[in-house]
Image: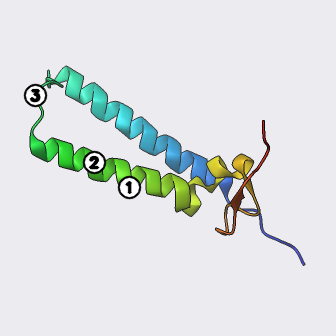
Amino acid sequence: MVTERPPYESYAAITGVFVGGLGLAGLAARLLDRNPACQTPLDFVVLSVASFKAARTLARDEVTSFLREPFVQGKAYEGDEDPVESGD
């Protein structure tokens, strides 16, 4: 039985494009003189939801399984992983 290798290179490329987009958004905010001290309650709500979604994506999504692989026992790609208990 041959097991397929997950497409980690593609996942890393997708993650890289996402992180690059975040960097461009930050650069655009700086170029447009967006004052980070002037935030509205809506900005706080949006940031809270985005932080939750990002954490959920890192912890559960197949696209970020290449990031979890060194830290779990089992196959991170399939979702049946447990944390590595190294004791270090």
Identify the mark at residue 53; answer none if there is no mark. Answer: 1
Q: Residues within 10 Å of mark 3 (few under 14, many from 20)?
A: few
Q: Residues within 10 Å of mark 2 (few under 14, many from 20)?
A: few
> Considering the numbered disc 1 on the image, is that residue within a helix, a strand or a loop?
helix
Image point (14%, 21%), residue name: 33
* Dot 1 or dot 3, earlier in sequence: 3
Quarter placement of the N terminus: bottom right
Estimate the x, y position of residue 82 in percent, counting from the top left: 70, 60
Name the residue type under label 1: Lys
* Alpha-carbon span between mark 1 and mark 2: 9 Å
Identify the mark at residue 44; answer none if there is no mark. Answer: none
Image point (79%, 44%), residue name: 86
Name the residue type under label 2: Ser
Q: Which residue is mark 2?
A: 48
- Residue 24 against residue 65 in the figure, above or below: above
Outermost bottom residue: 1
Q: Which residue is mark 3?
A: 38
Name the residue type under label 3: Cys
